[in-house]
Image (cartoon, rainbow, N blue to C red):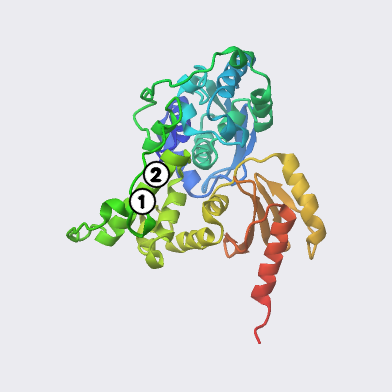
Amino acid sequence: MTDITSPWALAWEMAHKQATGSPATLLQGYNIYLAGGVPAGLDSQPGQISALVTPRHGEPARATIRIAPLSEEEQQALAAALTRSRHKGALLKGQLPAALADPAHTGDIPIAPGAAQVTFACDCQQAPCQHTAALGHAVTQRLHANPSLLTTLRGLPHRHLTGLLQAPDPAAAAAPEKHDRPRTPPRPTGPYLAAHQAYQNWDNSTPPLPAREAAVDGDASTASFAGMELPEPPAPAPSLQLLRHLATEAARQAQQLLTENTLLETDPVTDAVRLTASLPGGERAENVAYRLDMEPQAFRRLLKTYALAGAPGVRAARHPYPDDPQVLQQAAAAINPLRPDSAAPLATADNRVTDPTADIEIRHGDDGRWYPFAATGHDWQLIALPSDDPAGAYQNALTALHARTRPRR
């Protein structure tokens, strides 16, 4: 199911479907993806992404999707627009704000590819086929958590994009400074646009909010509910207490967006975990898991992860994304001296360094921190606090595992 709050995933999914052309092939690929036939580690590089796709009843094949990279002229035009953009800071951090899905903010150079810019190749010699369709669905889900993968596929990996953004911009230096420019409504970017994304498209910063009277218990976001007596909603609607909580949380986030220009969470699962964790006793956890098409046990693991490390920990638990290989190699070199058993080499893939002998995996989060996970059955669970460096995260994992196995007195 497509998350319509992610314009990058939506744009890719539309291009992938149109380029594939066959609904039957797309459905076959989706079934392979749901059955786990696409590995978590995708081989991505500028201009293409590939993986060994294994159908449940069929021969495995290496599928490749090629995406036409931006030309040098397009890269320069895009970089010139992004250098002057209010989103430059986010781009330098490896993020890809949703507002940039509108070409009006990217020098009329669309970052997302069109169907004509997507081609397929596969060992089965029948591309586009079920293997490439499965890979395409995997890319859609990857873009929900890591939209910056799209810039890599378009020929602009983070290091290259950073270099372009940090180069001098003569046009920006010569442009006269503008003051008190009137706010104009954002251009529509398609049939689906979340409110916070529309806000990010506004041309200049929000004027400060007027001073307000102190609210009950000092919380401005709950002031509108003070003294209001409302009837309890009929079943099966949520309780009045839950509705009050959700409305208060929405007001709090709106205030934070207006006053601090804070980006809101666009991953629906991470946001659902955040909201559920704030309810008394994790209320409605099983119901939320059902609506997210998740096993309740898996959702409860994410609740524990959120309690330990917040939203970045949940994203680290859910989504792999391509990381700088040099960063992973440096992390592996820092971890190796700490290993109790170094017979088997460390494995590096995406943003993860895995110690197969200790069942420990250190994941590089999108906030720059390192998160220690340990194997639990058929899944991985965050078992300790994150660290600013990979060696610290690995040591945290060892300490946590030792505490688990230490006999109680």
Select label 2 or label 1 by which is in front: 1
Q: Quadrant of the C terminus?
A: bottom right
Give residue 281's quadrant in the image.
Answer: bottom left
| Residue 341 locus on image (x, y percent) | 79, 64
Front-most of residues 350 and 22: 350
Left/right of residue 82 with respect to residue 255 in the rendered view: right
Front-most of residues 285 and 174: 174
**Disc 2 crowd, CA 10 A, few/some/many (<14, 14-19, 20+):** some
Q: Which residue has dot 2 on it?
A: 255
Instruction: Give the residue displayed 61% in from the left and 36% down from the top.
Output: 94
| Residue 1 locus on image (x, y percent) | 40, 42
**Disc 1 crowd, CA 10 A, few/some/many (<14, 14-19, 20+):** some
Q: Which residue has dot 1 on it?
A: 220
Q: How many marks?
A: 2
Where disc 1 sits, the SS reads: helix
User: What's under tag 2, amino acid-wise?
Assistant: Gln
| Res. 357 mark | none
Left/right of residue 34 with respect to residue 337 in the rendered view: left
Residues at circles 2 and 1 in contact by the CB criterion of under 8 Å: yes
Q: CA distance from mark 2 to mark 1?
A: 9 Å
Q: Earlier in the sequence, mark 2 or mark 1?
A: 1
Instruction: Give the residue displayed 36% in from the left and 64% down from the top.
Output: 283
Left/right of residue 89 with respect to residue 292 in the rendered view: right
Q: Is residue 174 above or below residue 126?
A: above
Residue 379 in view here: yes
Instruction: Give the residue displayed 44% in from the left and 55% down from the top.
Output: 273
| Residue 126 locus on image (x, y percent) | 54, 29
Residue 356 in view here: no
User: What's under tag 1, amino acid-wise?
Assistant: Ala
Where disc 2 sits, the SS reads: helix
Q: Is residue 341 above or below residue 45?
A: below
